[in-house]
């Protein structure tokens, strides 16, 4: 996580591949806001039925409700 000094007064976009529970992005966004940043969030897939936190990402490309396999995460 960048230092508070580097975030203060900045506009930032936090990006993740999926908002399922929403906990990861919500935590990172809150931390950045507490440091003084203007924060927006974006994901490729938003799963509103699985969210465990209030709100939603500011931007998303598609809605989903099932398991998503990304091609770059296979073959481990």
Image: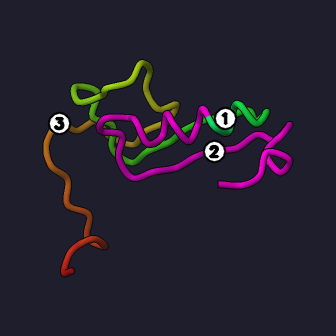
| Front in this rendered view, residue 64 or 39 | 39
User: Is label 1 in contact with label 2 (beta carbons under 8 Å)?
Assistant: yes
Mark closer to the observer (3, 1):
1
Q: CA distance from mark 1 to mark 2?
A: 6 Å
Lateral position of residue 1 relative to residue 47, left or right: right
Crowdedness near tag 3: few (<14), some (14–19) or many (≥20) residues, C-alpha within 10 Å: few
Query: First in sequence: mark 1 or mark 2?
Result: 2
Q: Say whether residue 3 is magenta.
A: yes
Crowdedness near tag 1: few (<14), some (14–19) or many (≥20) residues, C-alpha within 10 Å: some
Q: Is residue 11 above or below residue 75?
A: above
Give residue 13's mark.
2
User: Is label 2 in contact with label 3 (beta carbons under 8 Å)?
Assistant: no
| Residue at 70% over, 44% down | 12
| Front in this rendered view, residue 5 or 46 | 5
Lateral position of residue 62 relative to residue 27, left or right: left
Q: Quadrant of residue 4?
A: top right
Q: CA distance from mark 3 to mark 1?
A: 26 Å
Give residue 39's mark.
1
Lateral position of residue 3 relative to residue 26, left or right: right
Element under disc 2: strand
- Which residue matches tag 3? 65
| Front in this rendered view, residue 17 or 34 | 34
From the image, which quarter does the N terminus lie in? Answer: bottom right
| Magenta residue span | 1-30
Element under disc 1: strand
Query: First in sequence: mark 2 or mark 3?
Result: 2
The image shows residue 7 at horizontal and vertical percentages of: 79, 45
The image shows residue 10 at horizontal and vertical percentages of: 81, 41
What's the colour scheme?
rainbow
């Amino acid at each position: 996580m960048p230092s508070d000094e580097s975030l203060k007064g900045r506009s930032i976009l936090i990006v993740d591949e999926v908002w399922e529970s929403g906990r990861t992005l919500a935590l990172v966004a809150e931390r950045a806001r507490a440091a003084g940043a203007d924060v927006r969030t974006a994901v490729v897939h938003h799963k509103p039925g699985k969210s465990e936190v209030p709100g939603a990402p500011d931007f998303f490309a598609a809605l989903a409700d099932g398991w998503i396999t990304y091609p770059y995460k296979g073959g481990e």
